Image: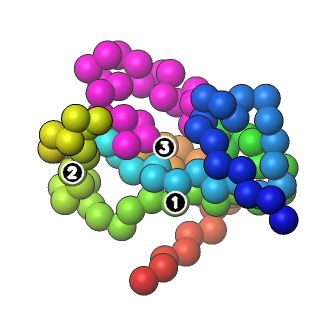
Amino acid sequence: GKVTLTTVHQAKGLEWKVVFVIGVNPGDFPHFLALKDNSLDEEERLFYVAITRAKDILYVTHSVLSRNDYTSYSTYGKKSNSTVDRDFIQDIPPYLVEFWRVR
């Protein structure tokens, strides 16, 4: 088999049988800077693009840390506490979700 690693931006228009969307944590996706730039709608559109790339199976992963424990790092390596209240995973209809916990 073949594995393709791509960004959400590069995935537009493409499809795969199985898709993993990783790091869907408040502060990462949506990014904490999206609040400052008023670009939360764009982050939501990107998430939609990401989850609709799967033909058969979609896996969405996130950290088990609580929002209070969650810390983001900018591209410059500076710590920043997440202030993003939006959790895209919670927006997926429950009948479409099967939660797994890996320890």
Magenta-drawn segment: 28-47
Residue 19, how many percent across, how many down? 71, 54
- Provide the residue designation for mark 3: 88
User: Outermost residue toward the top?
Assistant: 38
**Label at residue 71:** 2
Label 1 to label 3: alpha-carbon separation? 11 Å
Residue beneath the point at 15% across and 40% down = 78
Helix, strand or loop at label 2? It is: strand
Residue beneath the point at 61% across and 29% down = 9
- Residue 6 visible in the picture: yes
- Residue 80 visible in the picture: no
**What is the image's colouring?**
rainbow
Vertical placement of 92 versus 37: above or below?
A: below
Label 3 to label 2: alpha-carbon separation? 17 Å
Q: Where does the C terminus fall, quadrant-wise?
A: bottom left
Q: Is residue 78 magenta?
A: no
First in residue order: circle 1 vs circle 2 = 1
Residue beneath the point at 71% across and 50% down = 4
The amino acid type found where label 1 is placed reads: Thr
Residue 79, how many percent across, how many down? 15, 44
First in residue order: circle 1 vs circle 3 = 1
- Provide the residue designation for mark 1: 61
Q: Which tag is nearer the camera, tag 3 or tag 2?
A: 2
Task: Decide if residue 51 is on the left or right side of residue 44.
Answer: right
Task: Decide if residue 26 is on the left or right side of residue 49.
Answer: left
Vertical placement of 40 versus 61: above or below?
A: above
Helix, strand or loop at label 1? It is: loop
Q: Residues within 10 Å of mark 3 (few under 14, many from 20)?
A: some
Give the overall secondary structure of the magenta segment. Answer: helix
First in residue order: circle 3 vs circle 2 = 2
The amino acid type found where label 2 is placed reads: Thr
